[in-house]
Amino acid sequence: MKATQNIPSKIYSLNTLLHQLRRWRLHNKQIVFTNGVFDILHRGHLASLSEAAALGDMLIIGINTDASVKRLKGEDRPVNDEQTRALMLASLLMTDAIILFDDDTPLQLIKAIMPDVLVKGGDYTIEQIVGAKEVLANGGRVERAQIVEGLSTTAIIEKMRRTGHSS
């Protein structure tokens, strides 16, 4: 029997996540953090999340709230609401924790979590990765996940619009 009833328990508030982090660190777990909108979950996301998860013991994914996505991507985004996106990501085997953030960048969240490994897509330079300076200064690492060519949420949304499959 699958333990699907535990999926929502992977979605944390900041206070409960900080408490869980203390437990994980007591057990010397390597904490990995990545973030994004994850609006339409696709193979490229799965590849980068798998790569991120392999860099440590516990994978935390920060997800932009709906309000944050609208500010960054426009009024017709996100396609999927924040609770749907959080549940989809929490359903993945490689995911240990999900946390929503409302800021335009995850900097404050990264400072609070202070992961051992910060991961962002390979389309970013280290200098462009929000929180990289802080994680490096704390003795952590910053890694860039490989990009799966030809896959992006923007391209998928454009294809849906062209073929009449938009939401």
Image: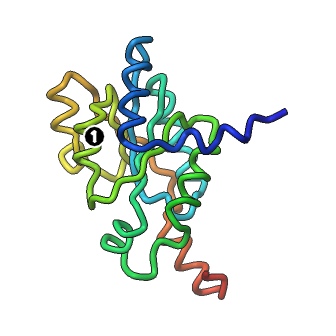
Horizontal side of residue 21 vs 84, given as left or right: left
In this rendering, the count of numbered labels is: 1
Question: Relative to 166, does residue 119 appear above or below in the rendering?
Answer: above
Q: Nearer the viewer, residue 48 or 135?
A: 135
Residue 14: quarter of image: top left
- Mark 1 lies on a secondary structure that is helix
Q: Indicate the position of residue 3 as horizontal and vertical percent values.
A: 75, 35
Provide residue 124's location: percent of width, then percent of height: 30, 51
Q: Residue at x 23, y 47 (%)?
A: 107
In the rendered structure, the answer to whether residue 106 lies left or right of residue 19 reads left
Instruction: Report the coloring of the rendering.
Output: rainbow
- Per the image, the residue denoted by label 1 is 110
Residue 114 at x, y percent in the picture: 27, 31
**Which residue: 51% across, 52% down?**
148
Quarter of the image where the C terminus is located: bottom right
Say if 24 sits above or below 144 in the image. above
Q: Which residue type carries mark 1?
A: Ile
In depth, the one of 43 and 29 nearer the eye is 29
Q: Left or right: where does residue 108 sit relative to residue 64?
A: left
Q: What x and y, as percent, mark residue 90?
A: 58, 44
The residue drawn where x is 44% and y is 11% is: 27
Residue 133, image quadrant: top left
| Rendered view: 16 above or below 90 | above
